[in-house]
Image (cartoon, rainbow, N blue to C red):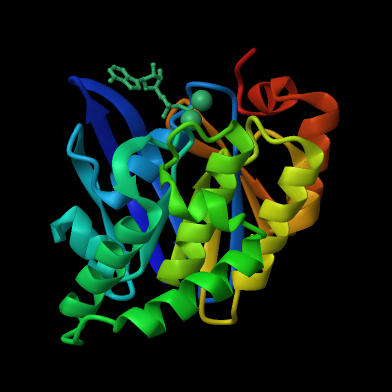
Amino acid sequence: MLEVKNLHATIAGKEILKGIDLTIRDGETHAIMGPNGSGKSTLSAVLVGNPLYEVTEGEAYFNGKNLLDMKPEDRAHEGLFLSFQYPVEIPGVSMTNFMKAAINEKRKYQGLEPMNAAEFLKLMREKRKIVELDSKLANRSVNEGFSGGEKKRNEVFQMAMLEPKLSILDETDSGLDVDAMRIVAEGVNKLQTPQTSCIVITHYDRLLEMIRPQFVHVLYKGRIVKTGGPELAKEIQEHGYDWIKEEIGEE
Ligand code: ADP
Ligand code: MG
Ligand code: MG
């Protein structure tokens, strides 16, 4: 599904990613952990094609296609989805119109006709149920005046609507209380299929206990310095990152 090799990237001339290698197969869930400022959000931004970042070295393939050659919107149409750490508010644009535009652009890319209104509303209703999103929120402007938890739930709703092949959740847990975290995690779990994959960026093993990744990576100073199973998330929760810094010869 995703193959990243020796990826280096800079922002404002400063190198943030310093050689990332990451392989994700169909159906796998990977967690990326790491101290603040390690480059986790940078990695997700580079994968979806945020133009603020410059890739200076390395390769990335998504379903066999050269990701780095693709426009950001085409990456999305190919099935890449990023749930933002800080979702933006879009006043004046209703969720309904926002989702209709996103879905029909994707259909256009696939050579399909726009979805008819009845079919679209049925889809909205179905997906809203999965993430327990209130119909009132779905009728408001995108994220406008939403609480932190509502914004995150809304992101998972967008993910449900777009049915991505690879979802990247960047700290979807920050600002969520335990109940909201459970609803988000359950939503994410319900959307996973043997053909879809997920990258969960988080500081907390509480979310990982619910989402259950097969692989846990530690990103530190722009490199993946350690990879393990779910037990690695537990060790980090208990002991922090210092022991990993020592392992790689740093204090
Ligand atoms: P994480 O998500 O792991 O907390 P980020 O990817 O957000 O880390 O940030 C990685 C590094 O990139 C940090 O040192 C941060 O200060 C730096 N950085 C992020 N955005 C910019 C920017 N616009 N200009 C300069 N440096 C930036
Ligand atoms: Mg951060
Ligand atoms: Mg971040």
Q: Nearer the viewer, residue 20 or 161?
A: 161
Between 14 and 190, the residue placed more toward the observer is 190
User: x, y percentage for residue 56?
Assistant: 18, 38
Name the residue nearer the viewer: 53 or 88: 88
Image coords of residue 130 (percent x, y): 64, 68
Q: Position of residue 217 (x, y in %)?
A: 60, 46
- Relative placement, left or right, of 184 versus 58 is right
Q: Is residue 131 above or below residue 232?
A: below
Percent across and percent down for residue 37 are 48, 21
- Look at 29% across and 84% down and name the residue there: 116
- Residue that extends furthest to the right in the rendered view of this protein: 238
Which residue: 38% across, 35% down? 88
Res. 229 in view: no
Q: Nearer the viewer, residue 19 or 123?
A: 123
**Would you place residue 35 above or below residue 42 in this image?**
above
Residue at 57 percent across and 75 percent down: it is: 126
**Res 248 quadrant in image:** top right
Relative to 130, does residue 168 appear above or below in the rendering? above
Residue 2, visible in the rendered structure: yes
Q: Quadrant of residue 149?
A: top right
